[in-house]
Amino acid sequence: MKIFPSSLCDRLPDVFRFFMGTLLFLGVADIHAAEVPNFNLLDLSGRNFELRRAGGKAVVLFFTGNGCPIARQSVGKLLKLRERFGADVSFWLVNTYANDSVSDCWKELGEFRMQSLTYLRDPKQGLALALGVERTAEVVAIGTTNWSIFYQGAIDDQLSEGAQKAEPQQKLLEAALTEFLEGQPVTTARTKSHGCRISFTLESRDHTSYAKDVVPLLQKHCVHCHREGGIGPWNMDNYGHVKNYARMIEEVLLTGQMPPWHANPAHGHWSNERGLTGSEAQTLLSWISQGAPRGEGADPLAEPLEPLPDWRLGKPDFVISLPKPQQIPANGVLDYRHVRIDLPVTNEVWLAAVDVKPGNRRVLHHVIVRAKTRGGGDDGSGNGLMLVGWAPGIACDRFPEGTGKRVGSGSKIDLELHYTTIGTPQTDETQVAFYLLDKKPARELTTRAVAQLELNIPPGADESRDSAIYGFEQPATIYSFIPHMHLRGRWMKYELLLPNGKRDTLLHVPRYDFNWQTSYQLAEPKHVPAGAWLVVTGGFDNSAGNTANPDPKKRVHFGQQSWDEMFIGFFDAADDTPSAGKEADGSSRADSRSNKRDAISH
């Protein structure tokens, strides 16, 4: 039996949210019960700040935007509050104007003497949206014990739109901080903020449609992994599953964990970028903030998907398999395994792509495919030249147009296999697919490495820096980068130092994630003159604050296992040679056009 009419029953969630929102605005309801989602934001120098790693007993977020007079006049008050409360409270300014550039922010920072404050950017406005911030000069005070809000509103009652008192009569934030730090209930937990209205990228945030607005974004960015046979831990195959994970989707969007893309947008343009635009992120966050409503109509996610292809790059020219299944024990630490396999060809071939199909993702940590030729080159491993590497997060793609990788006649393929145990015996039957070019390309592509082998990371250090350098003896073109560290890796940066002294940042990964070994492919390949240097710098976090750290009390050195460390800046490049163009048209090598034909005949 229904107590209310059907139409009202159907709208009870909306009625409840409206009622609770009114109580929150009036300061009647408790806004602190819900845990604030974690987030990551960058400062103007590209350093990452994570809420869950903030120091002190509380974090105060002050939302700002360039040019807002109330926000500007509040800076001095924040400086005084920081001086009063010291290390107990972290004060973070958050610029949430979508169109404020980094250079504009630097100018604002200097003009109004904010250099001593942590100044973060929220260009996609996700944090402001998630916390319900509509105006600049609003503060959100969060306790670091349970990560819930204990005060949200204005700093004090002195400033408002178009008006100003000589002195504040109520020091609202100061009173809330004092009561909170003394362990007392906060008397006034919610007040009206006064500042400049924030213009959000998304025009309408009130009635987001699941079927029309949300599902297309999930299909574009998420479903290809979160599906049967994909690498996602759960399937986005109906509304109910997405609803179950709605709050988790909110958090991974704010932390930048999903979609898995970690390049600082201030540097470089990428052909394989996986990030969401500001309006796309806001669409998903708005829908979640509305309670993730189902809406009317059919569920597009419930429609059956096309089966995944056997090979993502299409039908290969040939495939090699492990001679026999690899047996992985239930427990223990396993050394890297090297399996040598003969190719089904004996002549020299040029490769357009190499793809890896992992046989058992539960235990396969990584695969490196190398070509080993008697008397041929080596990448420093002793096992030949690297053709491709696979690890979670790496999607093997075709090599850049006009390039290819050479496998000399008589080569053997070396598969470097790293397995981890999971408590039960397992087997693996990984396969590798090869795609051949019809002729020798204009440039030979090689995977190179900038490595620092002499790592000495002190125990407990949260910022232990290292660097390595690579010199270009002849002109070359760079196509992509793969930063590689282990569980203590914090950030990595690739910079090009030109002979004229100019320094150019090519890639900056401010929040390195070992779970995603991402290849960053340049939208426009970078030409490098002879005499240039590629400088790779990075930092390790060996502190207890790094939740992935195997042992913060251990001094860490270079090693193969995940609890050791590595510092390798892989990159794909091709030398520019005078004969490259001539050889590319087949005039200098009689067998160039027969490359694929001869290979297949074998």
Image (cartoon, grey):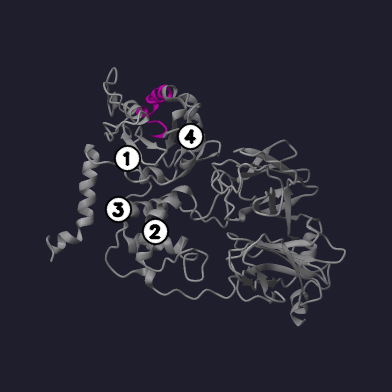
CB under 8 Å between callouts 3 and 1? no
Element marked by disc 4: loop
Please tell me which of labels 3 and 2 falls first in the chain.
Answer: 2
- For label 4, the crowd category at 10 Å Cα-Cα, with few meaning under 14, some 14 to 19 and many 20 or more, is some
Element marked by disc 1: loop
In this figure, which residue is indicated by the disc labeled 1?
134
* Amino acid at the residue labelled 1: Glu
How far separated are the C-alphas under marks 2 and 1?
A: 26 Å
CB under 8 Å between callouts 3 and 4? no
* Amino acid at the residue labelled 4: Gly
Please tell me which of labels 2 and 1 falls first in the chain.
Answer: 1
In front of the other: 553 or 484: 553
Foreground mark, 3 or 4, reads: 4
In this figure, which residue is indicated by the disc labeled 2?
245
CB under 8 Å between callouts 3 and 2? no
Element marked by disc 2: loop
